[in-house]
């Protein structure tokens, strides 16, 4: 593969900003009178597939200079507090801000008065092209998304395009934006993707673990007061036959007592990468005095937030396929197109779930109430527990009210996991900070089903059935063929 060479540059929206819907040129470049291009003196390097390196990469600031904001008198929001200057809005870097959780979070924080920058390599969009997948919802390019947000809200979100595994790029980004908090979503987040073949397993661990290590070193080197808010996963804990605590457990053994990190039982190479992240973050908090909050998130469902509902170009992605789709979202899409709900095995697998509107709430609460220097906090980020069978029953009932004939089938479980087990996870810390949960109600299920029905013509039914097997993973690269 040829090396890709480009001049390192920054792009800023000029005062002649165009409204939502303004198209790009046919070559996918921005219209010349919408952007000003400035050549940077710093060449950046980034990783590309199969180990090739581009000579330079591009930092894109798809915004105008930060607009002035009125400072709220309410310190609870956190948007008016900075570790160094309480008179300025907090500057929050959202790594992975083009993804499912990241996009919703970036808009939410911007809307709340934070100064926000998105850092993203846009690799998630590449995964879809590689695997022949697509979001249920049509999603605009990141540049059009940010133009639209600027036009609607008047607020600026900066954009840095590059790979955080390239420390030179990340260093320049930290020095340019100077974040007070970093929200780190920028990881390969699919367990099935990490189990496709050896190369995807290696990519997942390298991307996730090295990327997070680079973020930790960047905080130490350039922004030591910066608060890291890291997206973890409830999957780190596995399904132990005891209650799951929030990060730590107090144990008495042979007459002695200690509080230790809760044991981890990861169930995929993806989940293992999250365990490695947690250990690295805990160590650097202890050794370097970094302040960090690990949000062990459950399974997220839904697509709409207040901000993503403002315009069609702000719409979030919704994955329904067997690689990136999550259980409830998949079930709603399956019901909408008349495909039987695909319950893996016995269906007793129980997990914590939360609405995407609560994801953005939790992140804001963590930023507004930061960890202390040297503190590694762990919050279990979910609002309710359901088994797969319970979710299927809820979707079936809601679908029948809409006149849908919803059936359920049991399919062989492609994963290696307990299909019937005890599960009771604690999740009180975010509630204590002020989380107001959006619980899974009939009206919410009705809304999600209607949303799936609206876009059902975009569903590729060949992508619904699972095609990745935990036991069959091998060295040979796989293409995940459609069924």
Image: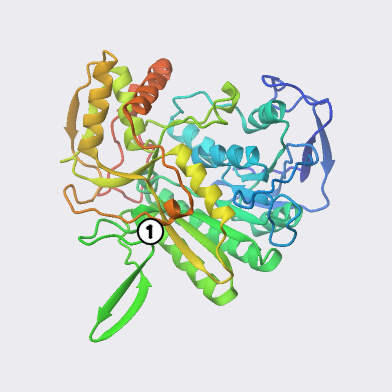
Q: Residue furthest top?
A: 403
Picture coordinates of residue 292, whole percent (x, y): 54, 63
Q: Is residue 318 found left or right of 465 in the rendered image?
A: right
Residue 198 visible within the image:
yes
Picture coordinates of residue 48, whole percent (x, y): 59, 47
Q: Residue at x 34, y 27 (%)?
A: 445
Question: Quadrant location of residue 345?
Answer: top left
Picture coordinates of residue 131, whole percent (x, y): 43, 34
Question: Quadrant location of residue 444?
Answer: top left
Q: Is residue 111 above or below residue 419?
A: above
Residue tagged 1: 272
Viewer-side residue, 99 vs 129: 99
Viewer-side residue, 320 vs 372: 372
Classify the position of the C terminus by image quarter: top left
Q: Residue at x 23, y 50 (%)?
A: 416
Q: Is residue 344 found left or right of 322 in the rendered image?
A: left
């Amino acid at each position: 593969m040829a090396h890709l060479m480009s001049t390192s540059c920054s792009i800023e929206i000029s005062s002649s900003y165009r409204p939502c819907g303004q198209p790009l040129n046919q070559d996918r470049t921005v219209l010349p009178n919408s952007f000003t291009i400035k050549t940077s003196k710093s060449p950046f390097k980034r990783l590309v597939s199969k180990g090739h390196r581009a000579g330079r990469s591009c930092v894109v600031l798809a915004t105008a200079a930060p607009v002035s904001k009125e400072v709220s008198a309410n310190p609870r929001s956190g948007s008016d507090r900075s570790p160094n200057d309480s008179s300025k809005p907090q500057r929050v870097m959202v790594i992975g801000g083009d993804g499912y959780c990241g996009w919703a979070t970036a808009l939410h924080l911007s809307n709340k008065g934070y100064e926000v920058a998105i850092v993203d390599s846009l690799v998630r969009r590449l995964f879809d092209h590689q695997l022949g997948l697509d979001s249920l919802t049509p999603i605009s390019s990141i540049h059009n998304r940010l133009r639209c947000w600027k036009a609607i809200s008047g607020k600026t979100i900066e954009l840095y395009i590059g790979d955080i595994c390239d420390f030179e790029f990340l260093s320049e980004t930290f020095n340019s934006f100077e974040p007070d908090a970093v929200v780190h979503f920028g990881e390969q987040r699919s367990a099935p993707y990490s189990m496709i073949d050896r190369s995807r397993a290696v990519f997942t661990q390298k991307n996730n673990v090295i990327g997070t290590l680079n973020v930790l070193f960047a905080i130490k080197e350039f922004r030591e007061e910066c608060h890291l808010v890291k997206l973890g996963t409830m999957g780190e804990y596995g399904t132990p036959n005891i209650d799951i605590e929030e990060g730590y457990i107090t144990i008495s053994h042979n007459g002695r007592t200690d509080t230790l990190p809760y044991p981890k039982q990861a169930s995929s190479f993806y989940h293992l990468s999250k365990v490695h992240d947690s250990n690295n973050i805990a160590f650097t908090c202890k050794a370097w005095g970094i302040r960090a909050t690990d949000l062990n998130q459950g399974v997220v469902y839904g697509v709409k937030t207040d901000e993503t509902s403002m315009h069609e170009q702000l719409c979030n992605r919704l994955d329904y396929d067997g690689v990136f789709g999550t259980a409830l979202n998949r079930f709603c899409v399956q019901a909408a197109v008349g495909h039987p709900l695909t319950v893996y095995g016995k269906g007793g697998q129980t997990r914590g779930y939360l609405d995407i509107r609560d994801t953005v709430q939790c992140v804001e609460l963590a930023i507004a109430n930061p960890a202390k220097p040297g503190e590694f906090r762990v919050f279990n980020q979910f609002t309710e527990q359901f088994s797969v069978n319970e979710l299927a029953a809820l979707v079936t009932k809601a679908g029948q009210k809409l006149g849908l004939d919803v059936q359920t089938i049991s399919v062989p479980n492609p994963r290696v996991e307990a299909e019937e087990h005890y599960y009771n996870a604690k999740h009180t810390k975010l509630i204590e900070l002020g989380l107001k949960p959006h619980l899974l109600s009939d009206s919410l299920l009705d809304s999600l089903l209607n949303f799936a029905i609206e876009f059902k013509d975009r569903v590729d039914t060949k992508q619904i059935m699972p095609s990745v097997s935990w036991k069959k993973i091998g060295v040979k690269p796989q293409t995940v063929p459609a069924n």
